[in-house]
Image: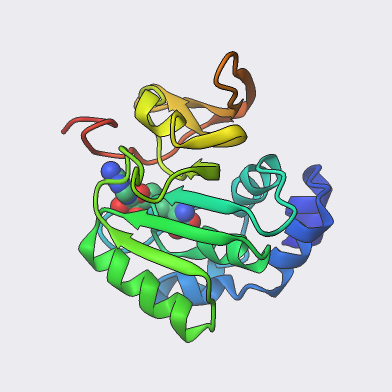
Amino acid sequence: MVAQDLRGRGIRDARVLAAMSVIPRHQFVPPEYEFHAYDDTPLPIADEQTISQPYIVALMTEALQLTGGERVLEIGTGSGYQTAVLAELDVEIWTVEQSKILAKQSKRRLERLGYESIHFFQSDGTAGLPYEAPFDRILATGSLPEIPGTLLSQLADGGIFVGPVGGWHCQDLVRIVYHTDQSEREVLCQCRFVPLIGEDGWHQ
Ligand code: SAH
């Protein structure tokens, strides 16, 4: 998977490739999908959600330009796979998951695998975690109709947001380098993510 689907498709960050080489993705998917765990594809997890496609996880993580020690907010813990990738990169993580089942499962899984430096929250993450801000990086692993201003304002100056923004069915994978005066916005690719349902996300 790492050689063919990640390095082969242009992921260059050696730390990201090394992280994804050591994480047992088969332990993050339901038993019936274990056989496909190293295919470059999203797979169903509990509560009608999905574990993201490995290439997209690598691309998003690379786009965060982590060197270690950063404070990272992740919105949408899901299976915890992306959280594990971040943890391998020696950052401090605040991860928020709305689904009670997934929040419980992923916390237990990541603790069992020995990951530390992760703060778990079960709530609506679309408003961020104002009391824990500022963050150096914010990663949304579900789609947003637009990026809430409250979220961006929780970034430190020069901090980076990465996430899918746009329509319900199709989004731009966006990277914002946040500056209080003028932010830079870049589209990395087109993508299709499950929605972040919440006060500052999609309304159901
Ligand atoms: N990174 C995850 C992908 C999870 S999919 C992985 O690789 O497994 C997106 C996740 O966002 C789902 O688990 C969904 O339950 C969660 N979610 C949806 N709305 C949310 C919200 N408002 N706040 C936090 N999590 C939310």
Residue visible at 67% across and 50% down in the picture: 58
Residue visible at 78% across and 46% down in the picture: 11
- The image shows residue 142, relative to residue 165, as above or below, that is below
> Residue 68: percent from the left, percent from the top?
71, 58
- The image shows residue 46, relative to residue 71, as above or below, that is below
Is residue 3 shown left or right of residue 171? right
One can see residue 49 in this view = no
Quadrant in which the N terminus is drawn: bottom right
Residue visible at 32% across and 39% down in the picture: 126
- Closest to the observer, 185 or 142: 185
Quadrant in which residue 189 is drawn? top right
> Residue 181: percent from the left, percent from the top?
57, 14
Quadrant in which residue 137 is drawn? top right
One can see residue 184 in this view = yes
Residue visible at 50% across and 77% down in the picture: 27
Is residue 151 shown left or right of residue 188? left
Quadrant in which the C terminus is drawn: top left
State the scheme by which the image is colored: rainbow
- Closest to the observer, 84 or 32: 84
Is residue 144 shown left or right of residue 122? right
- Closest to the observer, 109 or 8: 109
